[in-house]
Amino acid sequence: MRVRRGAGPVIKLAHFSQGSAKMKTSKIRHQLFLPKALSDRVGRIAEGTGRPRSEILVEALEAFLNRRNPAATEDALAVRLARFERHVEAIRRHQGLQWEVLARIMRHQMITAAGLPRADATTEAAAAKAFEAVIDEIADRLAGREAPPAADDGIIKVRRLN
């Protein structure tokens, strides 16, 4: 085993044999002062598992650093970004639907209400039925279902805006 001391930490280069192949590893020694309670906890874990204290400390330090790992943070951000993208897509879908509803309402007002006398009961019942059908379609579209085919060129144009 070689030991090199310099301005930095102690570096130990050790050669371990594993079967017939030799494996070279390097470890840097760090001196660490722990409060007695923490040292006792590490000691109990070491005794209970039969593992060296240094191995337990290395594992704990790795777990601590992995939580702060930029790669893990990037993965978490990628998940959040994907969720935001889904939300934005839903907002776009809803916005397109809002434009379509507005276009339908405007067309209806301009065609049927401009200068017409008050409708009779039969016409009002037909209008109520048509209104209910529009509300049902809006609910279906907000739930993510596809729009039914449109024969109206104006509605087709509005749908292209989405």
Image: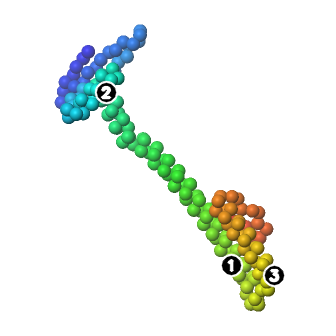
Circle number at residue 121: none
Within 10 Å of disc 2 (Cα), the crowding (few <14, some 14-19, many 20+) is: some
Q: Is residue 81 left or right of residue 14?
A: right
Q: Which residue is mark 1?
A: 106
Report the front residue among 16 and 7: 16
Q: Quadrant of residue 59?
A: top left
Under mark 2, the amino acid is: Ile
Q: Mark 3 touching mark 1, by CB under 8 A?
A: no
Counting residues from the N terminus, which is met first, the one under dot 3 or under dot 1? 1
Q: Mark 1 touching mark 2, by CB under 8 A?
A: no
Q: Is residue 20 left or right of residue 143?
A: left
User: Where in the figure is residue 3, as x and y percent of width and height?
Assistant: 22, 19
- Give the secondary structure at mark 1: helix
User: Where in the figure is residue 32, as x and y percent of width and height?
Assistant: 21, 31
Note whether 130 is above or below 4 in the view shown.
below
Under mark 3, the amino acid is: Thr
Q: Nearer the viewer, mark 1 or mark 2?
A: 2
Q: Which residue is mark 2?
A: 45
Residue drawn at 18 percent across, 27 percent down: 6
Distance Cα–Cα, label 1 vs label 2: 74 Å
Q: Quadrant of residue 116?
A: bottom right
Q: Which residue is mark 3?
A: 122
Distance Cα–Cα, label 2 vs label 3: 83 Å
Residue drawn at 38 percent across, 40 percent down: 67
Under mark 1, the amino acid is: Met
Residue 161 visible in the shown view: no
Report the front residue among 162 and 63: 63
Distance Cα–Cα, label 3 vs label 1: 22 Å
Note whether 24 is above or below 88 in the view shown.
above
Counting residues from the N terminus, which is met first, the one under dot 2 or under dot 3? 2
- Give the secondary structure at mark 3: helix
